[in-house]
Image: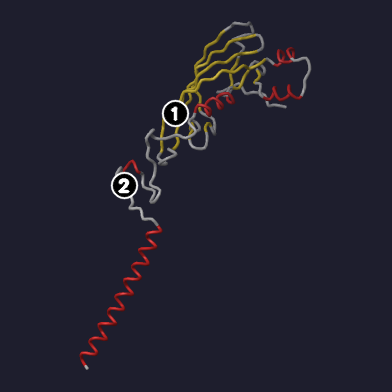
Amino acid sequence: MNARLDHRSPLVFDTRELGRRPGALQRLSRSVEAPADLGNEVIGVSQGAPVELTLRLESVMDGVLVTGTARASVQGECVRCLEPLERELEADFQELFAYPDADARTRPAESGDDAEDEEDTFFVEDDLFDLEPVLRDAVVLALPMQPVCREDCPGLCSDCGERLADDPDHHHDAVDIRWAALQGLAGTAKDGEKDNMGGAEAGVDEKQEK
């Protein structure tokens, strides 16, 4: 059994003033603190940060249709250069919170599909509805999956990890490992030639002394 909603929660809204007369409207604005984990792995709204909500509540036959916009500042890091970034996010959403009795009236028999549908349905409970799951889905969908500090961010140097935006001329002399191996062999051969030349010269000197 689900726990009863707490009317003191900032993301729980009371619909008693709206009433159940189809067509009735109510507009609300509320600033709330962001719940935990409002985001994805790389960017999101910090817990406790202000989220500005603008809502339109409309009474319909089967429940309360909630249309709204959430605005908040999101923080994260650039996926290319790993620098911190911050930007303003605006997420729109619309969801129907169904009356439990209306839902029962419109479904004559419960089946497996009906049970699955119910899991995806939000309800008005004791004239209250909880906006948090809807807000969470809307914010996460509006967030970029690959946030960047700027569209042309060059990222990090693959050799040393230097941030390329700080040094546009940054580069490393690339050496083909195959040529490097040949250069090593050439160096070894030259050293051998020097040793042989040195030995030959020493032999000549010995002969001259004799």
Verify CB contact (< 8 Å) between mark 1 and mark 2: no
In the rendered structure, the answer to whether residue 90 lies left or right of residue 162 reads right
> Outermost residue toward the bottom?
210
Assess disc 2: are there few (<14), some (14-19) or many (≥20) residues with their C-alpha within 10 Å of its C-alpha. few
Q: Nearer the viewer, mark 1 or mark 2?
A: 2
Q: Where is residue 139 in the image (x, y as percent from the top left)?
A: 52, 27
In the rendered structure, the answer to whether residue 39 lies left or right of residue 87 reads right
Quadrant location of residue 154?
top left
User: Callout 2: helix, strand or loop?
Assistant: loop
> Outermost residue toward the left?
208
Quarter holding the C terminus is bottom left
Q: Mark 1 points at which residue?
A: 73
Q: Where is residue 203 in the image (x, y as percent from the top left)?
A: 27, 86
Q: Name the residue under label 2.
A: 170
Q: Nearer the viewer, residue 81 or 170?
A: 170
Q: Which residue is drawn at 40% across and 48% down?
A: 158
Q: Nearer the viewer, residue 105 or 51?
A: 105
Q: Distance between the residues labelled 1 and 2?
A: 33 Å
Kind of residue at disc 1: Ser
Q: Which residue is drawn at 31% across and 78% down?
A: 195
Q: Residue at x 48, y 25 (%)?
A: 51
Kind of residue at disc 2: His
Q: Where is residue 153 in the image (x, y as percent from the top left)?
A: 37, 37
